[in-house]
């Protein structure tokens, strides 16, 4: 079994406001800073990375208005965007450059061992429009590329912001083919069904945790349905205590549904090596935010967690050493990991959230 490795160090040059970033990452990494500082741009980088290694870079770029919108201050000032990710024994680097048709194409793509002096393995040559990692693996050309793939393809960015009436998480979905919770939690019902069938203890713990925030919740009602095509579908029904009535997904509030999705992501039994979550506190009750902080801290013992937040209450659940302050200086994002020892005097009288409120930690509004 190949080990799935978290990220040790990340270098980004020329991506949106991330013009020159070098960031060392630990097990728990909490990004704080004002709106527009660059936290969401880092989240966007991870989304791009996942799409890129899956061979969908051009679709991702096109949906965001073309390469000129991706490169720092546009292609005229930043014709190339480069990055290096160090994880375990590996370092993966790539450079994308602007093409005439608003695309971003590969200038180079390489993989190397960090601890063994050797020549980098070239993955993509100049001019390729998509990553060739999958192709290298399928052709059996690079065992190292396969090991790399098992790490980076396992990193998941969770965007669980759309819990509206038309959100996919509230709709009927296919039953099979899901061994992980999708980034938008659209397969929540199918994934919970799999947990109930094969990981009963985890499923029970998820239900127990949900009841701490939604006391009237009893259990999910997960009933596969056979359709004419011969496939099975499923939808997220649920029950209250002391009632046999089956409630539909539309009868869960946005905050309740978002909390269920987050709990499931953080308690999954075979977690990604790294998960990235943007502002998980949105729409949650204050007690749910406190509980969420404990879940994030606990999850960081089993997986690497990168989370962006502006919630003082959520920050109260972390130590200063977990925090990375993001600030925008002359249009460029600057990342600074804090040290708790620098704030010992303040922490005698104030919590971490209060220090954020008072702008003592930095990254606040002027």
Image (spheres, rainbow, N blue to C red):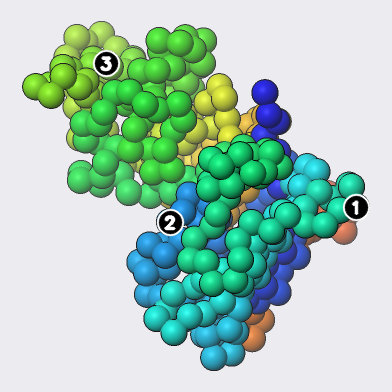
Picture coordinates of residue 341, whole percent (x, y) = 89, 53
Asked which quadrant contains residue 20, the reply is bottom right
| Nearer to us: label 1 or label 3 | 1
Give me the residue at 52% from left, 26% from top.
268
Residue 218 at x, y percent in the picture? 33, 15
What is the residue that sits farthest to the left in this orientation?
Answer: 228
- Residue placed under numbered mark 3 in the picture: 221
Density class for disc 3 (Cα within 10 Å; few <14, some 14-19, many ≥20) is: some
Name the quadrant of the N terminus.
top right
Taking depth in this image into account, of 68 and 100 the one nearest to the observer is 100
Q: How many marks?
A: 3
- Can residue 297 be seen? no
Label 3 element class: strand
Question: Disc 2 or disc 1, which is closer to the eye?
Answer: 1
Label 2, on which residue? 56
Q: Residue furthest bottom?
A: 76
What residue is rendered at 40% in x and 13% in y?
Answer: 196
Percent x, y for residue 352?
71, 51
Q: Which residue is mark 1?
A: 117
Is 241 placed above or below 150 here? Answer: above
- In the depicted structure, whether residue 31 falls above or below residue 295: below
Where does residue 78 sit, x and y in percent of width and height? 60, 84
Q: Quadrant of the C terminus?
A: bottom right
First-in-chain label (2 vs 1): 2
The residue sitting at 64% across, 67% down in the picture is 108
Does residue 117 sit above or below 178 in this rendering? below
Q: Is residue 98 left or right of residue 260?
A: right
* Within-10-Å neighbours for mark 2: few <14, some 14–19, many 20+: some
Of mark 2 and mark 3, the one earlier in the sequence is 2
Q: Nearer the viewer, mark 2 or mark 3?
A: 2
């Amino acid at each position: 079994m190949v080990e799935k490795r978290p990220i040790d160090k990340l270098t980004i040059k020329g991506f949106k406001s991330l013009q020159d970033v070098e960031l060392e990452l630990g097990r728990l990494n909490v990004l704080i800073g004002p709106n527009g500082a660059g936290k969401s741009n880092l989240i966007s980088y991870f989304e791009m990375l996942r799409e890129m290694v899956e061979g969908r870079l051009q679709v991702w770029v096109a949906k965001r208005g073309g390469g000129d919108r991706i490169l720092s201050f546009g292609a005229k000032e930043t014709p190339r965007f480069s990055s290096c990710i160090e994880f375990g024994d590996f370092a993966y680097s790539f450079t994308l450059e602007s093409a005439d048709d608003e695309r971003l194409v590969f200038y180079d793509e390489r993989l190397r061992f960090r601890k063994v002096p050797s020549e980098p393995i070239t993955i993509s040559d100049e001019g390729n429009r998509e990553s060739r990692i999958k192709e290298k693996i399928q052709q059996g050309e690079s065992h190292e590329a396969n090991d790399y793939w098992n790490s980076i393809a396992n990193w998941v960015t969770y965007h669980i912001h759309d819990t509206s009436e038309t959100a996919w998480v509230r709709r009927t979905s296919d039953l099979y083919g899901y061994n992980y919770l999708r980034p938008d939690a659209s397969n929540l019902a199918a994934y919970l069904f799999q947990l109930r069938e094969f990981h009963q203890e985890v499923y029970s713990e998820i239900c127990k945790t949900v009841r701490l925030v939604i006391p009237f919740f009893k259990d999910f009602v997960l009933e596969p349905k056979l359709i004419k095509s011969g496939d099975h579908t499923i939808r997220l029904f649920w029950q209250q205590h002391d009632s046999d009535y089956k409630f539909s997904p539309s009868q869960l509030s946005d905050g309740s549904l978002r909390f269920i999705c987050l709990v499931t992501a953080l308690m999954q039994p075979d977690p990604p090596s790294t998960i990235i979550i943007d502002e998980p506190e949105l729409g949650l009750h204050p007690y749910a935010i406190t509980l969420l902080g404990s879940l994030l801290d606990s999850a960081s013992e089993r997986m690497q967690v990168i989370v962006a937040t502006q919630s003082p209450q959520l920050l109260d659940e972390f130590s200063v050493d977990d925090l990375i302050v993001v600030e925008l200086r002359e249009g460029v994002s600057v990342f600074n990991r804090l040290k708790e020892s620098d704030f010992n005097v303040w922490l005698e009288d104030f919590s971490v959230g209060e220090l954020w409120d008072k702008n003592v930690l930095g990254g606040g509004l002027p």
